Each structure stands twice: as structure tokens, then as C-alpha cells.
Image (cartoon, rainbow, N blue to C red):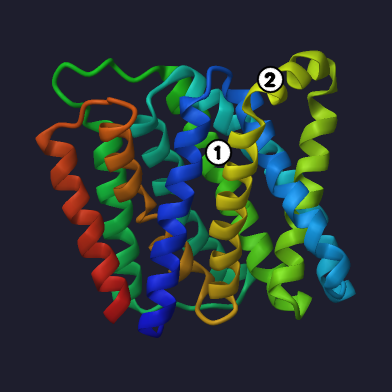
Amino acid sequence: MSGATVLLVLFAALLHASWNALVKAGPDKLLSTVLVASGGAVLAALALPFLALPAPASWPWLIASACCHLAYYRLLAAAYAHGDMSHAYPLMRGSAPLLVALGSAALVGEVLSLRQYGAIALICAGVLAMSLRRAAGATPPSRRATLFALLNAAVIACYTLVDGIGVRRSGAPLAYTLWLFALSAAVLLVSVMGERQALRAYAGRYWKTGLLGGFVSMASYGLALWAMTAAPVAVIAALRETSILFAALIASVFLRERLGVRRLCAVGMIAGGAVAMRFA
């Protein structure tokens, strides 16, 4: 990977942690998630008329990814409703890269080197250590939050592999990304039609947050998908999970969640894994 690709993926990681913090800070986690997804869809709809369609070979992957994202958004909201961001986020994002690395060899035909697998393992170990070791005085992690986060890790691994294949077959990473956000939001909105009155009232109060979160979310994943066309999917997936570093800072400073020395040491493991990934 070039240095520019690494920097773009790290920037995408910062953006990802930021929109997750917007969801966690909202009074209703599910409706906040729906607003962020819808905000991204609105922005995507404005640009799609000016772009050519992705290649037909990528359409089945787009549909599969939209279905995966429905599960992702629902599990994300559930995890944040039952636990701290500094607990749920590491489990969701830290478990996924290892699953991606194991699946990419069979599905994408990418065989990583031992050093790359070592860097992935170091990142995963650091992220999981952050989650499993709670800070002194912090609220004990909820079992439901842990379960939802681990289930979401499997979903994240699935859509990462699906999109890694789909974006390469699309011939148009930007158009693929925008269609993905539009379709994912449509599926999610259909799933919450039973709460449309509550959603309408919620959107009236927090629509600006939805647009901001949607833009940040779309930019984050768009950069990651572009990077997957220039580097192995498993490598990008692992490097992107350094977003936990930014999530830890945001959770501590803005959400007032307590972090201990052990979690800070785990941050060092993640940073070391990121550096190792760069030079592997």
C-alpha cells in the first residue's frame, strides 16, 4: 500500500468513529441510526443522476450488501442502546478484520503474508483487550451489548467481503457506494414503517444531525471501498479498524465514558498493528 492509501483509510476510520458517536449521543439509538442512513441516501440521490450505473455484474452484490446493512444498522442501534460506545465499538470493529482475513482467501483469492496476518492479529488483540478490560469505576458491560456487538462483527465481515467483490466488479467505486447507501436506507426505512410517526417527529428535531452523519458515513465507507480496489480487502479492513483509537478519544472527551490504563495500553497495541500493516 502507498502512504497516500494508508492516510485515506485512517481518515476514513476517523470519520467512521465520528458518525457512530452521533448515533450513540442521540436519545433514540434506532431512530438516530435511521436518520444517519437516510441522510446519506438523500445526499447520494442528489449525485446519482450525474453518474453512470455500476456494471451489471456488481448488482447482485449491491443487493446482498443492502440486506447485510439492514442487519448492521439494527444491531448497531441495539448495541449502543445497551452499552457504552467504548465497549460495543471495539467488539464490533475489532472482531471483524480477523473474520475478513479468514474469508478473503476463499472468496476473493487473496493470500496474505505471515507478517500481514501478524499485524491483523495485533490490531484485533488490542481492540478486544480494550473491550474486555473495563476501566475502574466504569459501568460493567451489558451481556446484551456484548452479544449484539459480536453478532454485528459477523455482519460487518460479511458486507466487507461482499462489497470488496462488488466494488471491483462495478467499474465505478463512487457510483457503487452511492447506490449502496440509497438501497440500504430504503430497506432500513421499510423495516421501521411501524414507527413512522415517531420517526417523523424525531426527524423534525434532529434532521441536521442526520444529514451530517449521513455525509460523514458515506465519505468514510466510500474511501474504504476505493481503497479496496487498490489493496487487499483484508488489509484495508484491518487498517480501517484503527477507528477504535478515534472512538476511544471521542467516547472519553465528548461522551464522558471512562477509560483506564489497561485500555490505553491496548490502544498502543492497535497503533503498533497499524504501523506493522503499513510495512508488512
- Mark 1 vs mark 2, CA separation in Å: 25 Å
137 versus 164 height, above or below: above
Find residue 34 and report its horizontal and vertical position in percent: 69, 32
Residue 46 placement (x, y as % from top left): 80, 57
Is 186 in front, or is 60? 186
- Residue 258 is marked as none
The residue drawn where x is 51% and y is 19% is 81
Above/below status of 244 relative to 189: below
Q: Is residue 20 shown to the viewer in this render?
A: yes
Give the amino acid at mark 1. Answer: Asn
* Nearer to me, 11 or 127: 11
Horizontal placement of 186 versus 83: left or right? right
Circle 2 Cα neighbour tier, 10 Å, few/some/many (<14 / 14–19 / ≥20): some
In this rendering, the label closer to the viewer, 1 or 2: 2
The x, y position of residue 250, in whole percent, is 32, 39
Quarter placement of the C terminus: bottom left
Q: Quadrant of the N terminus?
A: bottom left
Please give the label number shown on residue 202: 2
Query: What residue is pinned by disc 1?
Result: 152
Question: Which residue is rendered at x = 55% and y = 67% of the image?
Answer: 223
How many numbered circles does the render carry?
2
13 vs 231: above or below: above
Image point (27%, 81%), residue name: 279
Query: Where is residue 98, by image quadrant?
Result: bottom left
* Residue farthest bottom in this picture: 2
The quarter of the displayed image where residue 136 is located: top left
